[in-house]
């Protein structure tokens, strides 16, 4: 993902350039630097900060390293775009919130890119406008062709459904009250260590119910879609698009193979909005508080993997700083 963002910042985004690659693995650092002419490399964030080599930081390290990168970057007062998740658990996310509040201004945008996807934005507008009546129910599918070799059962929640745990309350305008996980018949084509597909059931504070099929062994391609049921209508997003081909007695439409193409427009818009805001001395998009709420939801979701029935979410009051 880091290399993807380096390429995006270098070729697509205006108003910023990659001045440094911070990466402990020398081979990866050199490969990423090769995508960004003029970029210098560092193995530690502290070294880059000490050398004043950056005036904003995009964090694309694996989630377990986020806190250790975020804390010095926040202390240095730099604008930050942090790939999801903010951190992997509520306690460390809380420490990041404390650090940002100490810095005295919003610095962090969390990389929940679906909020920048044109179709998700349209759907959110439809909900907010009330023109189809009240939102009652959301159905979602989140399908990946295959799981990476290091993908664990918990990652169904913390790496994949983490997106729905952000985007569902954002779409519906209501926080999640509880989460339940049900297991479908196991796909024997998936790795032995995984039990999936799963069905996540999220109940929102206002009574809206959202279900999501999470399937990381779908084989055929990458698909993220949703259907929203309103009082007076139904809306769908994420259907296969692009070239339709009628041939040999059937119709075919292309499907994505990766989130990198399905959400390319969203990633571009997300990073551009971060750069624009940083240049204006502001922060935009999903905040660290949003990231914290998702960390709490992920912790409940992980418990739901081994609990029968719904697991309740407990969120503290929104700190005044983020209200
Ligand atoms: C991956 O890390 C992502 O963020 C993708 O959007 C998601 O579809 C996939 O399941 C994750 O592993």
Image: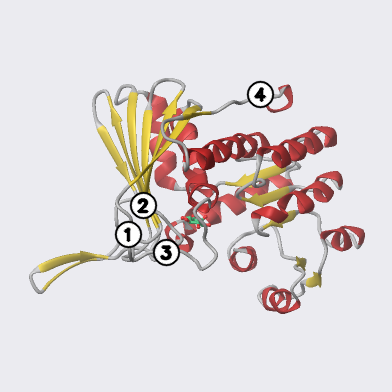
All told, the count of numbered labels is: 4
The residue indicated by pointer 4 is: 318
Q: Nearer the viewer, mark 4 or mark 3?
A: 3
How many C-alpha atoms fall within 10 Å of the one at disc 3: few (<14), some, or many (≥20)? few
Question: Residue 263: image x %, image y %?
Answer: 46, 56
Can you say whether 264 is above or below 27 in the image?
above
Judging depth in this view, the residue of 241 and 211 nearest the camera is: 211
Secondary structure under the numbered disc 3 in the rendered image: loop
Q: Nearer the viewer, mark 1 or mark 3?
A: 3
Can you say whether 41 is above or below 177 in the image?
below
- Whether residue 166 can be seen here: no
Secondary structure under the numbered disc 2 in the rendered image: loop
Going from N to C along the chain, the mark reached first, 1 or 2, is 1
Circles 2 and 4: CB atoms closer than 8 Å: no
Going from N to C along the chain, the mark reached first, 1 or 3, is 1
Q: Which mark is residue 192?
A: 3
Q: Nearer the viewer, mark 2 or mark 3?
A: 3
The residue indicated by pointer 1 is: 187
Quarter of the image for the C terminus: give it: top right
How many C-alpha atoms fall within 10 Å of the one at disc 4: few (<14), some, or many (≥20)? few
């Amino acid at each position: 993902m880091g290399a993807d963002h380096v390429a995006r910042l270098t070729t697509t985004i205006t108003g910023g350039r990659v001045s440094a690659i911070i990466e402990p693995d020398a081979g990866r650092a050199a490969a990423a630097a090769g995508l960004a002419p003029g970029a210098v490399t560092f193995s530690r964030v502290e070294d880059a900060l000490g050398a004043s080599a950056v005036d904003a930081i995009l964090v694309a390290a694996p989630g377990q390293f986020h806190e250790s990168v975020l804390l010095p970057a926040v202390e240095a007062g730099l604008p930050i775009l942090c790939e999801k998740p903010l951190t992997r658990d509520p306690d460390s996310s809380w420490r990041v919130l404390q650090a940002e509040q100490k810095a005295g201004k919003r610095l962090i945008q969390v990389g929940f890119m679906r909020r920048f996807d044109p179709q998700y934005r349209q759907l959110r507008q439809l909900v907010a406008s009330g023109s189809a009546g009240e939102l009652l129910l959301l159905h979602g599918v989140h399908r990946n062709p295959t799981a990476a070799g290091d993908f664990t059962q918990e990652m169904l929640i913390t790496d994949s459904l983490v997106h729905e745990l952000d985007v569902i309350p954002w779409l519906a305008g209501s926080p999640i009250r509880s989460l339940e996980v049900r297991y479908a018949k196991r796909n024997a084509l998936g790795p032995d260590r995984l039990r999936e597909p799963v069905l996540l059931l999220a109940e929102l504070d206002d009574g809206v119910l959202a279900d999501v099929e999470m399937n990381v062994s779908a084989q055929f391609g990458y698909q993220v879609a949703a259907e929203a049921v309103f009082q007076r209508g139904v809306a769908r997003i994420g259907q296969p698009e692009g070239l339709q081909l009628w041939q040999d007695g059937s119709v075919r439409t292309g499907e994505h193979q990766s989130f990198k193409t399905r959400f390319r427009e969203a990633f571009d818009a997300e990073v551009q909005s971060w750069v624009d805001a940083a240049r204006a001395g502001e922060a935009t998009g999903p905040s660290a508080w949003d990231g914290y709420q998702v960390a709490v939801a992920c912790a409940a979701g992980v418990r739901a993997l081994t609990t029968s029935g719904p697991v309740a979410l407990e969120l503290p009051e929104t700190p005044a700083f983020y209200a």
